[in-house]
Image: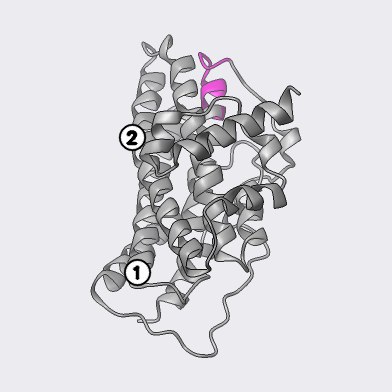
Amino acid sequence: MNIYEVLEQAIISDDIYLKEKLTAQCLAYCSQNEVSVKEDFVPVRFTQPSYANICTIVAPRELRTRKDFETAEGLASLVHSIAHIEFSAIDLALDAVYRYPEMSGEYRVDWLEVASDEIRHFKMLNDLLEEVGFAYGAFPVHCGLFDAANNTADNILDRMAIVPRYFEASGLDVSPQIIKKLDNKRKIPAVGKLIDILHIIYEEEIDHVLKGDKWFKVLCEKEGKDVSVYFEILERYDLLSKHRPHVNVEARKEAGFSCDEIKNLVQRFVSETFL
């Protein structure tokens, strides 16, 4: 089995069921077999995200912020935005395997497991979206995660720092705040279901960030770099000034961040925002 051909097909497909089938095939194969790579294999640099034919892509500043979660459209817009993050995360997890064939079998299995989780997350959210009368693609989206993948395509250390240890870790900061805002509307059946889904995603995303943390540290050791290079990478990608004000200390510690790193993140945010 040439898993790289299968992965490429899974990454470019906008069919969630085909993504699910191909990801399961790759995970089953990689869990039981050594993977050989053709010497002339060169990963494709994707020019557009897989959802480009489903969703209208706009700049982040053009996205509307809705707070009227008691209306079907308002709730659907929130569910859609989270579903889009999960759909994007599927492709990023698959790309983490596809783009870096030099990595070990353990690495491949880790990120294929992450992709499987993200597929399940998307399907739960998409089912809820359809339940309230909408579908994936009903609202505009941005392609920030796709851009992050492209920007880090040539450097796996940067990829592990930026995607799991920055973007996914930022999700750990934000999710409890979203759940808290929704909690007083829990009696609305669809909102109650969304809260339950967000709890599942939150718990499993801790493991995803932990996997990213593990491979970030493995790569730092391999390249003879201190883990503090994380902050140099964030500065290079101009991400420190965009860090959210709330840092979920307990979740980040559970996901592998040291106390010093967490303190540094808080200090960097304060200095960028208030000083």
Q: Which of marks 2 and 1 is nearer the N terminus?
A: 1
How crowded pointer 1 is (Cα within 10 Å; few <14, some 14-19, many 20+) is rated as: many
Residue picked out by circle 1: 26
Q: Where is residue 74 in the image (x, y as percent from the top left)?
A: 57, 21
Q: Is residue 237 visible?
A: no
Q: Can residue 148 be seen in this view?
A: yes
Query: Could you tell me how many numbered marks the image carries?
Result: 2
Which residue is pictured at 46% across the width and 34% down the height? 172
Residue 10 bears which disc, if any? none
Q: Which residue is drawn at 35% across and 81% down?
A: 1
Q: How crowded is mark 2: few (under 14 residues within 10 Å), some or many (20 or more)?
A: few
Give the percent coordinates (x, y) of residue 56.
67, 45
Is 181 rendered above or below residue 83?
Answer: above
Q: Give the range drawn in magenta.
A: 68-77
Element type at mark 2: helix
Kind of residue indicated by mark 2: Ile
**Which residue is tagged 2?**
200
**Which element is circle 1 on?**
helix
Q: Is residue 144 inside the magenta stretch?
A: no
Q: Position of residue 52 (x, y in %)?
A: 63, 54
User: Residue 79, image x and y in percent?
Assistant: 50, 31
Residue 115 is left or right of residue 135, and the answer is left
Tell me the chief SS of the magenta region. helix
Q: Distance between the residues labelled 2 and 1?
A: 24 Å
